[in-house]
Image (cartoon, grey):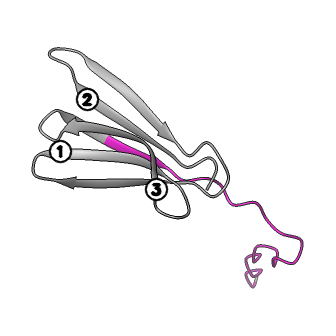
Amino acid sequence: MVGDRVEIVVDAGGATRTWEVEATKAGRRVDIAHGRGVVEVSEVTRGGTPVRTARFMSSRVLALVEHPAGQARLADDEPPALPLPRPA
């Protein structure tokens, strides 16, 4: 979904560095995979083809912050429920 974004914070030997991987076009998403000492963050098309991939050593990754895309409200969506009035 356009707007999906993952922030990766990495220990760079005394300092921290931050990278971002973002779904840049409609229909793309960001996937995270980890295993065997590697964290992989990829921008993936609808068909599953990776477009961009970032790989990091898992021992150096301090944080993975996922920022999901906001969902726009549609005209036929129900309005948010209002709290019931409390009796006096």
| Amino acid at dot 1 | Val
In 3D space, how far apart are the residues under numbered discs 1 and 3 (Cα atoms)? 20 Å
The residue at which mark 1 appears reads as 38
Quarter of the N terminus within the rendering: bottom right
Q: Residue at 37%, 26% (x, y): give it.
A: 18
Q: Which residue is mark 2?
A: 10
Q: Quick check: is 68 in the magenta stretch?
A: yes
Which residue occupies the extreme bottom position in the image?
Answer: 87
**What residue is at 75 percent from the left and 85 percent from the top?**
87
Q: Magenta segment, which residues?
A: 64-87
Give the numbered dot on residue 68.
none
Instruction: Determine the secondary structure under disc 3.
Output: loop
Element type where label 1 sits in the image: strand
Circle 1 or circle 2, nearest the eye: 1
N-terminal of the pair, mark 1 or mark 2, is: 2
Position of residue 4 measured from the top left corner of the image (x, y, whole percent): 55, 49
Question: Could you tell me the amino acid type at mark 3?
Answer: Thr
Q: Please tell me which of labels 3 and 2 falls first in the chain.
A: 2
Q: Amino acid at mark 2?
A: Val
* Label 1 with label 2: CB-CB less than 8 Å: no
Q: Relative to residue 37, is residue 35 depicted above or below?
A: below
| Label annotation for residue 49 | 3
Could you give the CA–CA distance between mark 1 and mark 2, rounded to whole angstroms?
A: 12 Å
- Residue name at image x 76 percent, y 60 percent: 72
Marks 1 and 3: which is nearer the front? 3
Mark in front: 3 vs 2? 3
Tell me, yes or no, whether the two marked residues, 3 and 2, touch with CB atoms within 8 Å.
no
Q: Secondary structure at mark 2?
A: strand
Q: Residues within 10 Å of mark 1 (few under 14, many from 20)?
A: some
Asked if 71 appears above or below 60 in the picture, the reply is below
The quadrant where residue 52 appears: top left
Residue 45: name its quadrant.
bottom right
